[in-house]
Amino acid sequence: MSYEVSKSEEEWREELGEERYAVLREQGTERAWTGELLDEERAGVYTCAACGNELFVSGTKFDSNCGWPSFYESVRPEAVELIEDTSHGMVRTEVRCARCGGHLGHVFPDGFGTPTGDRYCMNSLSLNFEAQE
């Protein structure tokens, strides 16, 4: 697939650093309960750490008690790309940034009590947070 923001793997590796590269470009996952944005409670916008695309707003973040920042919907449907993921002997839905293809995490239909019923389980390493003034 072709993305609006496209770089060589060498450019991504240099720009993102080892940890972010492993998650965003190699579909890695940070360890549960270790992400910097897990307990972020300020109002603001969550953007893609690779390209700056706006992905989630703070009002859709909720505590799912899963160890990763969780949201019940993206800022707009076209901000993310959803892809069937059959790795690790499971069937899941991978969430990627629609602008650069960076791996963000997975979405699950178990966001009980949320308006959408979805839980976008995201890696903090895939996101930047811009607090509202």
Image: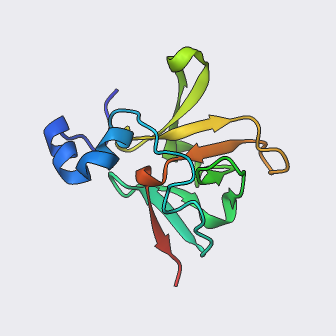
Image spot of residue 27 (x, y percent): 40, 33
The quarter of the picture where residue 11 lies is: top left
Image spot of residue 18 (x, y percent): 26, 46
Residue 130 visible at all: yes
Image spot of residue 28 (x, y percent): 41, 36
Residue drawn where x is 33% and y is 51% of the image: 50
- Tell how many labels: 0
Scheme by which the image is coloured: rainbow
Residue farthest right in this picture: 113
Determine whether, in the image, residue 120 is placed left or right of residue 26: right
Residue farthest bottom in this picture: 133
Residue drawn where x is 51% and y is 42% of the image: 80
The quarter of the picture where residue 1 lies is: top left
Determine whether, in the image, residue 16 is placed left or right of residue 70: left
Q: Indicate whether 8 appears above or below 131.
A: above
The quarter of the picture where residue 102 lies is: top left
Residue drawn where x is 37% and y is 42% of the image: 24
Residue 8 visible at all: no
Q: Indicate whether 70 appears above or below 28.
A: below
> Is 56 or 38 nearer to us in this picture?
38
Residue drawn where x is 60% and y is 65% of the image: 39
